[in-house]
Image (cartoon, grey):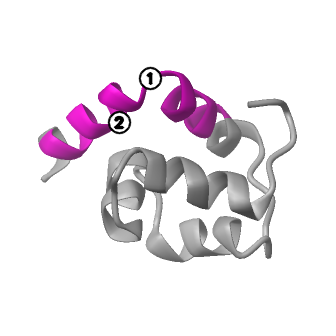
């Protein structure tokens, strides 16, 4: 995943990890509203959000584990 993300990238990543929007947002510690903005390309993730997505792309198992501990 490069420095620039597109709406389809975020949605595809979430679907690859097999999480709903609510689950993915909870696992990342962001609001569902923020995630939807990213997925619908209204806002491009940067800074900490981009870092979280890069970690999710490289280590999807950690994201799923984080969801389990957040629930």
| Tag 2 secondary structure | helix
Tell me which segment is drawn in magenta: 51-68
Side of 64 where 46 appears, left or right: right
Is residue 62 inside the magenta stretch? yes
> What percent of the width, then of the height, locates residue 71?
12, 53
Q: Where 42 falls versus 8 (above or below)?
A: below
Please identify the residue farthest to the right as the structure is shown.
4
Question: Considering only vertical position in the picture, is 50 above or below 41?
Answer: above
SS at mark 1 in the image: loop
The quarter of the picture where the N terminus appears is top right
Q: Residue at x 46, y 56 (%)?
A: 15
Q: Which residue is mark 1?
A: 59
Question: Is 59 left or right of 39, judged from the image as shown?
Answer: left
Q: Which mark is residue 48?
A: none
Q: Residue at x 30, y 60 (%)?
A: 23
Residue 9 image position (x, y, % from top left): 69, 52
Q: Which residue is mark 2?
A: 63
Residue 7 within the segment the image draws in magenta: no
- Residue 27 rendering spot, x and y as whole percentages: 34, 48
């Amino acid at each position: 995943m490069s420095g620039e993300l597109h709406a389809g990238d975020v949605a595809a990543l979430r679907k690859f990890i097999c999480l709903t929007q609510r689950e993915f947002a909870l696992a990342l510690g962001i609001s569902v509203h923020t995630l939807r903005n990213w997925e619908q390309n209204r806002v491009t993730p940067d800074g900490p959000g981009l870092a979280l997505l890069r970690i999710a792309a490289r280590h999807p198992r950690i994201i799923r584990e984080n969801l389990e501990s957040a629930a």
